[in-house]
Amino acid sequence: MARPYDPGPKQFVFAVGDGNDKHVSVGDPQEAYTAFSAFFQGREADTYRIEDEAARQSLVLMPGLGVISRIREADRPRSEHLRIDRVNRCLTGAMLFFENGYAGLDYFGQWFSDLADLDAAPEARGAARAATFTTEAAAIVEVARIWAASGFVDPSDRYFVFFGSRNVDEDRAERAELLQLIEFLGLERVDAPAEAAGGEVWVRTDPRLDTEFARWS
């Protein structure tokens, strides 16, 4: 059961730019998600906006373009943008926003402050994202985020496997980022077994990763 908002209820505004905004008052994130899911699936629009007016934060979903934007107008105003490859990521992002607002999406993917960066090739986006991590601690957290989305520990407990069962055409931006972070951290990449999917990346376990990965398991 979702934890109730405290203080609650919480108010959100759902909009698609046609003037028929929907105002909802909800007691918890699940109730907010249920209301927005019905709003989202009942329309065909280029842009869907969720506004938390009290917190001065909003989430903008553009499924046709494959883009999500998050906006924070209070406490150091900021906006960031994310390329998505599946429409269902829109609803996942919405749930994270309902749970913890702008910060709830911190680890959802590769955020960029410049919308134009999303037009770059996936490999260029991954390299640009990796370059933003200049400390070992931050890089390890980012590697853990990537692993948590589709990774596992191999049965021998000797290797962390990233992008499990994925092919090389999937997750290209995140794979490019990971490979650069592996080099930055001095991790040992090993050849994947012959039976592994072509897009998998295998890395020998490392004590620096063990603790952080445990937090994401």
Image: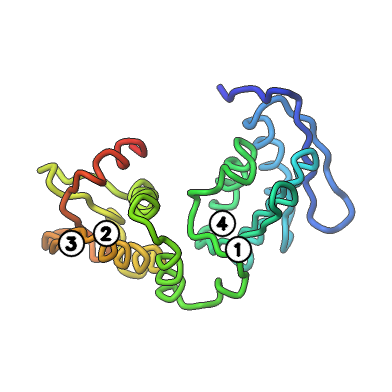
Given this view, does label 3 or label 4 mark the residue nearer the observer? Answer: 3
Q: CA distance from mark 2 to mark 3?
A: 11 Å
Question: Pointers 2 and 3 in contact (CB under 8 A)?
Answer: no
Q: CA distance from mark 3 to mark 4?
A: 32 Å
Q: Which residue is mark 4?
A: 87
Q: Which residue is mark 2?
A: 185
Q: Which residue is mark 1?
A: 67
Q: CA distance from mark 4 to mark 1?
A: 9 Å
Q: Which of the two labelled residues, at mark 1 and mark 2, occupies the earlier sequence position? A: 1
Q: Nearer the viewer, residue 88 or 146?
A: 146
Question: Measured from the top left, where is residue 150 in percent x and y?
Answer: 34, 50
Q: Residues within 10 Å of mark 3 (few under 14, many from 20)?
A: some
**Is 203 placed left or right of 178 in the picture?**
left
Q: Quadrant of the C terminus?
A: top left
Q: Which residue is mark 3?
A: 189
User: Circle 1 — which element?
Assistant: strand
Furthest residue in direction right, as rendered = 19
Q: Nearer the viewer, residue 106 or 138?
A: 138
In the image, what residue type sits under mark 3?
Answer: Arg
* Residue at 61 percent of width and 70 percent of height: 114
Q: Which of the two labelled residues, at mark 3 and mark 4, occupies the earlier sequence position? A: 4
